[in-house]
């Protein structure tokens, strides 16, 4: 086994092909040979037996002198029969005690004669001849008939057939070797090509894609898989780059205003009121910076942390009421309608295992987004429950998200092109997604630009 | 006496609104058995008859969000509804539809004329024409579907789009 694992899969395939084709050829040839031998031998044996029988009948007829011997039958099955070579026939009347002498005179083994006498019929094979003996006994007669003939197959066909089969076996092996040589040259060529091409791709030229092969489905699958993987890698590289540039931009903006304000106020001595104004600007900007870094921190914590969150049973409708009242306290202009018309009658179907604070944060984010990007038009929050999931739907009639930007909205710091006049850092949605992911939930967004957005959240309900 | 109600469907969320609307109007009735029925052309070939499989048809119709919506409705109106099931009608004429109604013990048919049923599945067909010609008691429910809200095929949002 060690050796087989060591050789490359190219030679392994070739070897497998060679072994299987040669063994199939051998199997076929052996089967063919044995069955032909059997058929011919059976045929020959039956002819011999028939001849024995006829001879006996003729002899019985002669003995009883009922009808003269039929020449035609004798000719047909007699010494000139074309399928029996080197014919011999013996008709021997049995007298007690002559069996031993009989066997010696015919140079046949005693057991053969004994067998004929005992069971009425027997056969014997010596170097070149096949013997068949039959015993006929009546009140009037008691004799055995022994016929012998040379096995035509053995003598003429067998060696010829063997020669042909050996030659064809050798030819088959030769052909198999040639094909497997060709295979070894060509089968793995495209794979080697793919390997070479993939090696060429690195972080600089991630936009390279593998070309599809003609007429090769399996390889095209491999190539497509590679290309899809490259797409994903490219996207994640891009979003990482985006993240870095967006993050540094977001963090720099308040810093620039702080530095600018400080710089201006330090350029010459100023009145205390002016210092107060500058300091309040600086404080405001620093607070912004603080909230941005806090948001980043919570994103990082929810995204990939090893900490185990405190999970408890949360009732989604209560949580949503809580979220809505919090939002309405903070943003007085927000119009939120909580649609309870599809609440299940059994409240246990609204219970979710989760972290109250995080879920609160997630839903607050979604609802605030709805308010913000619809200029405080009505936002509808609805809840329903299937037997396994709670479904929360937040609908707004705001600016929506452009179609081609929909796939980026979960990237940190990404902001859609139509959100320029709204404040925000682009952390809310990625944070929400991370939180829902932690709760084995799912978030889908359906949107039409300038019509509105529907956010659909599925959370698995608590199992009892 | 508990009634069995048939609602023609194209497996869109909108057709569930018919049920919801009906339940809102008839809150007094309890123990309703709901049958959502759709036409399904099995074709006339013997192989399709031989390999007829209800589960495969259901799979083909892509009923994931429809089933979710059904569960939501079932949970909401659990004191009114005894059970909801989906049946396929594969006949071609009025008398086989009559048999279909009798076989499912349908007492009442609820449908809407405000919405045209349609499905992407080529074997699906609308059974509303049969309903209109049958003698079984029926109610037409007016539906005011607002098309303002963006919706996708697999979205449950139409179910929630009713503003109360």
Image (tube, coloured by chain):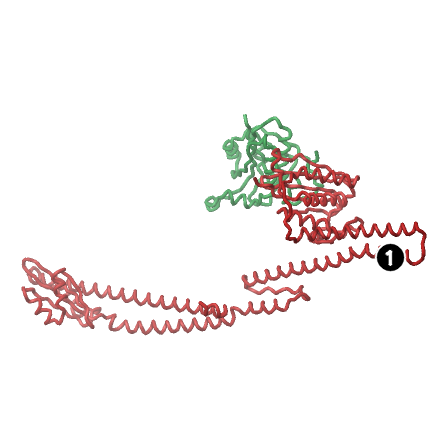
Chain colours: A red, B green
- Vertical placement of residue A451 versus A404, above or below: above
Residue A398 % position (x, y): 75, 44
- Location of residue A270 by image quarter: bottom right
- Location of residue B136 by image quarter: top right
Q: How many marks?
A: 1
Residue A185 % position (x, y): 51, 72
A266 with respect to A106 (left or right): right
Say which residue appears at 90% left-offset and 57% top-offset.
Answer: A266
Q: Quadrant of the C terminus of chain A?
A: top right
A91 with respect to B158 (left or right): left
Which residue is nearer to you in this view: B74 or A368? A368
Question: Could you classify mark 1 by the number of other residues whose Cα lies within 10 Å: few (under 14), some (14-19), or many (20 or more)?
Answer: some
Say which residue appears at 72% left-offset and 37% top-offset.
Answer: A337
Residue B111 in view (yes/no): no
Say which residue label 1 marks. Answer: A260
Residue A147 % position (x, y): 15, 67
Which residue is nearer to you in this view: A366 or A214? A366
């Amino acid at each position: 086994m060690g050796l087989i694992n060591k050789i490359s899969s190219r030679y392994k395939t070739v070897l497998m092909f060679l072994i299987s084709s040669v063994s199939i050829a051998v199997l076929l040839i052996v089967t063919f040979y044995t069955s032909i031998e059997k058929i011919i031998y059976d045929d020959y044996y039956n002819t011999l037996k028939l001849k024995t029988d006829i001879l006996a009948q003729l002899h019985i007829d002669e003995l009883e002198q009922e009808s003269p011997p039929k020449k035609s039958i004798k000719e047909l099955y007699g010494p000139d029969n074309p399928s029996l070579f080197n014919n011999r026939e013996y008709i021997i009347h049995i007298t007690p005690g002559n069996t031993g002498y009989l066997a010696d005179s015919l140079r046949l083994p005693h057991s053969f004669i004994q067998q004929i006498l005992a069971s009425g019929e027997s056969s014997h094979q010596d170097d070149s001849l096949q013997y068949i003996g039959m015993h006929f006994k009546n009140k009037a007669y008691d004799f055995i008939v022994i016929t012998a003939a040379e096995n035509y197959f053995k003598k003429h066909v067998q060696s010829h057939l063997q020669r042909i089969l050996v030659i064809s076996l050798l030819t088959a092996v030769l052909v198999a070797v040639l094909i497997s040589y060709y295979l070894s040259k060509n089968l793995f060529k495209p794979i080697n090509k793919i390997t070479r091409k993939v090696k060429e791709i690195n972080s600089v030229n991630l936009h390279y894609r593998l070309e599809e092969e003609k007429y090769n489905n399996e390889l095209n699958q491999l190539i497509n898989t590679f290309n899809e993987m490259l797409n994903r890698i490219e996207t994640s590289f891009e979003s990482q780059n985006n993240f870095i540039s967006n993050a540094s931009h977001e963090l720099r903006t308040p810093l620039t205003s702080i530095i600018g304000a400080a710089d201006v106020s330090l350029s010459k001595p100023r009145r205390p009121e002016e210092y107060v104004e500058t300091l309040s600007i600086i404080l405001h900007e620093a607070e912004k910076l603080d909230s941005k870094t806090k948001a980043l921190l919570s994103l990082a914590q929810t995204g990939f942390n090893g900490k185990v969150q405190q999970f408890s049973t949360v009732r989604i409708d209560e949580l949503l009421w809580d979220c809505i009242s919090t939002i309405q306290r903070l943003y007085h202009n927000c119009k939120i309608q909580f649609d309870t018309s599809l609440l299940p009658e059994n409240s246990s179907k609204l219970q979710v295992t989760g972290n109250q604070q995080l879920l609160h944060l997630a839903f607050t984010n979604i609802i605030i987004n709805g308010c913000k990007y619809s200029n405080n038009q009505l936002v509808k929050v609805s809840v329903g429950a299937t037997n396994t999931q709670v479904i929360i739907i937040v609908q707004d009639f705001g600016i929506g998200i452009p179609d081609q930007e929909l796939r980026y909205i979960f990237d940190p710091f990404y902001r859609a092109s139509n959100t320029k006049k709204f404040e925000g850092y682009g952390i809310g949605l990625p944070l929400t997604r991370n939180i829902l992911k932690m709760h084995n939930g799912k978030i889908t967004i359906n949107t039409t630009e300038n019509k509105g957005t529907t956010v659909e959240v599925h959370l698995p309900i608590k199992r009892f | 006496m508990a009634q069995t109600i048939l609602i023609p469907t194209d497996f869109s969320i909108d057709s569930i609104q018919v049920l919801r609307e009906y339940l809102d109007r008839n809150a007094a009735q309890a123990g309703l058995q709901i049958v959502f029925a759709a036409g399904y052309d099995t074709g006339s070939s013997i192989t399709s008859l031989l390999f007829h499989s209800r589960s495969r048809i259901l799979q083909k119709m892509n009923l994931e969000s429809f089933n979710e919506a059904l569960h939501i409705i079932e949970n909401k109106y659990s004191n009114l509804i005894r059970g909801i099931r989906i049946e396929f009608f594969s006949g071609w004429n009025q008398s086989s539809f009559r048999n279909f109604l009798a076989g499912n013990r349908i007492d009442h048919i609820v449908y809407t004329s405000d919405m045209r049923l349609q499905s992407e599945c080529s074997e699906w067909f609308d059974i509303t024409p049969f309903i209109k010609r049958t003698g079984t008691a029926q109610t037409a429910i007016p539906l005011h579907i607002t098309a303002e809200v963006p919706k996708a095929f697999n979205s449950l949002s139409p179910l929630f789009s009713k503003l109360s």
